[in-house]
Image (cartoon, rainbow, N blue to C red):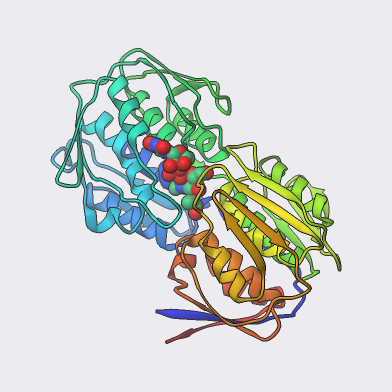
Amino acid sequence: MDRVIIEGGHRLEGCVRINGAKNAALPIMAACLLLDGPSRIKGIPNIVDIKTQSEILRNLGGEIKRLEDGALGIMFRDGENEDKFTAPYELVNKMRASICVLGPLLSKRRKARVSYPGGCVIGQRPVNLHIKGLKALGAHIETAEGYIHATANGLKGGEFSFAAKTVLGTCNIMTAAVLAEGTTIIENAACEPEVQDLANFLNRAGARISGIGESRLTIEGVKQLHGVDYEIIPDRIEAGTFMIASAITQGDVTLEHVRIDHLGAVIDKLKETGVEITVKKGDTIRVQGNNTYHAVDLTTLPYPGMPTDMQAQFMALLSTAEGRSVITEKIFPDRFIHAAELRRMGADIHVEGSCAFIQGTPSLSGTHVMVSDLRAGAGLVLAGLIAKGTTHIHRVYHLDRGYEQLEKRLSDLGAIIKRIPY
Ligand code: EPU
């Protein structure tokens, strides 16, 4: 286990290129189970979650390799893997997102056995809505011995309305429906850019999905899907994290390869706190920090609202803003473990239910802190960038799940940050 050490107080300046989106890549990789023929997918980041997903897919017969141009080649040979339909506990417990093989497996192999994902530090995270939606398409599903056992004798299109918006739930029903007989209508579908990217990918492979980006999706089943060349969208959470890195250090950082239209809520809230943001070209954005920021209130919501995956990073920024901010967490009401770690750095944060009250303090101080999950880790790194003295960040393997070469990219911008083994 490594730890990351940051010497705070260094202004970030320069240019950083944003990688492809982890949360688009994971379901798109799983959707390759549905395709006949090889695919080349560009922009897939080199992070631990992608390695885990690759392992899960190899276990299901997938041939996956990095190609010379950096794209990921993925292929499943038709007719050779019918007996492979299990995503085992050893892999699912490394990454809950592996649940997104459920829809494709059920559709293509008519059978799936996927370890039931447990809760995690950000919440209980049930999968009841995934199961309900798949049943609406005719799947037979039981849970036993910690596994979801699903079978389908040919899925049939149907109408399903999600009781609550769920990103991977929508992905699972969409991937189950694309090869089903007839038309499926999904109401109250998640509209996140990553869900849209999956739908666009499937359409490129021959699927017929309409209403992309809206909460009502219509999917006309087709007989077959083919392999494709595709480039996934830039990661809006990685972009948001670097935007706050620039803001919090009073820096001047230009981000390249971003989708400005995916960052509306983040940009608006940063501007409200006093950060200067200039869109330079279609996919380039400049973020200039200020001496003082004002407290703001924010509420995490489904897209196009403020992403829950940016909550910890905003909390770090607001810890030293003038006045009292309130963060309300509407997606994962318990996702506040980082608040206690930020308090160890001198932040004045009080959590009550799904709200965090942050009274800005003039400065933070470096100390030892522990990462509980990927985005909490990002928040602590940001706090470390401005803390007085040295911050030691433990359990950084969480960061490696979702950020490629984070220390190198921050140090290229002027941060004093390094990783050391214990
Ligand atoms: N929910 C249910 N039942 C279900 C499914 C979800 O009650 O069957 C609830 C959840 O407990 C939660 C809410 O619905 O309260 C929304 O959860 P959602 O299903 O949308 O989350 P997810 O699909 O499991 C994805 C991202 C998360 C991100 C959330 C919310 C991936 C791989 N993961 O998770 O990303 O926080 O959507 O936007 O796409 C991260 O990248 O660090 C991360 C945690």
Residue 227 at least partly seen: no
Q: Is residue 414 left or right of residue 341?
A: right
Q: How many marks?
A: 0
* Residue at the farthest top position: 182
Q: Residue 16: image x %, image y %? A: 68, 64
Q: Residue 363: image x %, image y %? A: 75, 75
In the figure, residue 168 lies in which quadrant?
top left
Q: Is residue 421 left or right of residue 250?
A: left
Q: Residue at x 79, y 69 (%)?
A: 251
Q: Residue 84: image x %, image y %? A: 17, 43
* Viewer-nearest residue: 395 or 318: 318
Image: 124 above or below 349: above
Image: 345 above or below 286: below
Q: Residue at x 60, y 70 (%)?
A: 342
Q: Is residue 82 left or right of residue 51?
A: left
The quadrant of the rendering that contains the N terminus is: bottom left
Residue 364 at least partly seen: yes
Q: Residue at x 55, y 70 (%)?
A: 341
Q: Is residue 291 left or right of residue 369?
A: right
Q: Residue at x 75, y 70 (%)?
A: 361
The quadrant of the rendering that contains the C terminus is: bottom left
* Viewer-nearest residue: 21 or 158: 158
Image: 12 above or below 140: below
Q: Residue 51: image x %, image y %? A: 37, 59
